[in-house]
């Protein structure tokens, strides 16, 4: 007999199904009906976990924050600023390759126009991630590993490189490993920040 999945296991599965729908059709196509169909359950079964589509999207965004938190935690183990940034890019690009959705979520008008709650939730995730990157840069400045910079602009640069590399990768048909860009990106940052 097949073991029943725990609520947390099922919600994790729902996170990746939502990611899959977003990558294929966009955020506006996420619905309880589509998620239920892909899970192989009835639509009412989804209501055990979420009241409606908005609640699913809010969960998705909060789970995304957990994923980004893990990336920052791993990056924090690097021995210097550039190793931390390399680890950050490796793991961030791996998450994008796995889910194929981060840029679509960030630039989705469904987030910005539909619900103030969703817009604020996504803004909080982005600010949380930027704060983690700012901390890496601040420590790098304090240890004299990088030059004095405005850490807000530096964090935007780090995130901007993720976005531009991802866009190029997506437009190129996702035909190569995005993680392979990590060396190039960190080498560029060394030229700018040293």
Image (tube, helix red, strand yellow):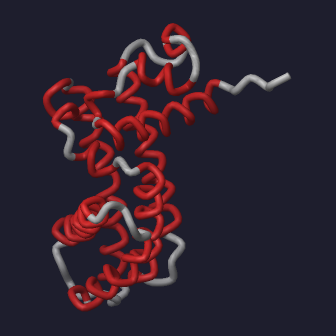
User: Is residue 49 shown left or right of residue 194?
Assistant: right
- The spot of residue 122 in percent (x, y) is 28, 40
Residue 63, relative to residue 132: is it above or below?
A: above
User: Is residue 127 shown left or right of residue 132?
Assistant: left
Q: Is residue 70 visible?
A: yes
Residue at far left of view: 113
At horizontal 36% and vertical 29% (from top left) the residue drawn is 58
- The spot of residue 14 in percent (x, y) is 51, 31
The quadrant of the picture occupied by the C terminus is bottom left
The quadrant of the picture occupied by the N terminus is top right
At horizontal 45% and vertical 70% (from top left) the residue drawn is 90
* Quadrant of res 107: top left
Residue 88, relative to residue 79: is it above or below?
A: above
Q: Nearer the viewer, residue 114 or 16?
A: 16
Residue at far top of view: 44
Q: Is residue 155 visible?
A: no
Q: Nearer the viewer, residue 56 or 35?
A: 35
At horizontal 28% and vertical 68% (from top left) the residue drawn is 165
Q: Nearer the viewer, residue 127 or 35?
A: 35
At horizontal 42% and vertical 30% (from top left) the residue drawn is 59
User: Is residue 2 shown left or right of residue 194?
Assistant: right
Residue 114, relative to residue 80: is it above or below?
A: above
Q: How many marks?
A: 0
- The spot of residue 113 in percent (x, y) is 13, 29
Residue 101, relative to residue 111: is it above or below?
A: below
């Amino acid at each position: 007999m097949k073991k029943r999945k725990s609520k947390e296991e099922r919600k994790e599965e729902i996170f990746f199904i939502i990611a899959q729908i977003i990558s294929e059709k966009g955020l506006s196509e996420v619905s309880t009906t589509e998620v239920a169909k892909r899970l192989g359950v009835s639509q009412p079964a989804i209501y055990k976990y979420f009241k409606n589509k908005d609640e699913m999207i809010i969960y998705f965004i909060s789970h995304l924050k957990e994923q980004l938190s893990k990336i920052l935690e791993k990056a924090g183990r690097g021995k210097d600023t550039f190793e931390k940034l390399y680890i950050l890019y490796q793991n961030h690009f791996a998450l994008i390759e796995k889910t194929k959705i981060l840029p679509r979520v960030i630039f989705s008008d469904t987030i910005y126009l539909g619900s103030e709650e969703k817009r604020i939730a996504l803004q909080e995730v982005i600010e949380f991630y930027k704060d983690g990157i700012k901390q890496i840069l601040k420590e790098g400045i304090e240890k004299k590993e990088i030059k004095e910079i405005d850490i807000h602009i530096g964090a935007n640069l780090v995130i901007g490189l993720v976005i531009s590399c991802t866009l190029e990768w997506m437009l190129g048909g996702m035909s190569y490993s995005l993680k392979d860009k990590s060396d190039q990106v960190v080498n560029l940052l060394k030229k700018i920040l040293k």
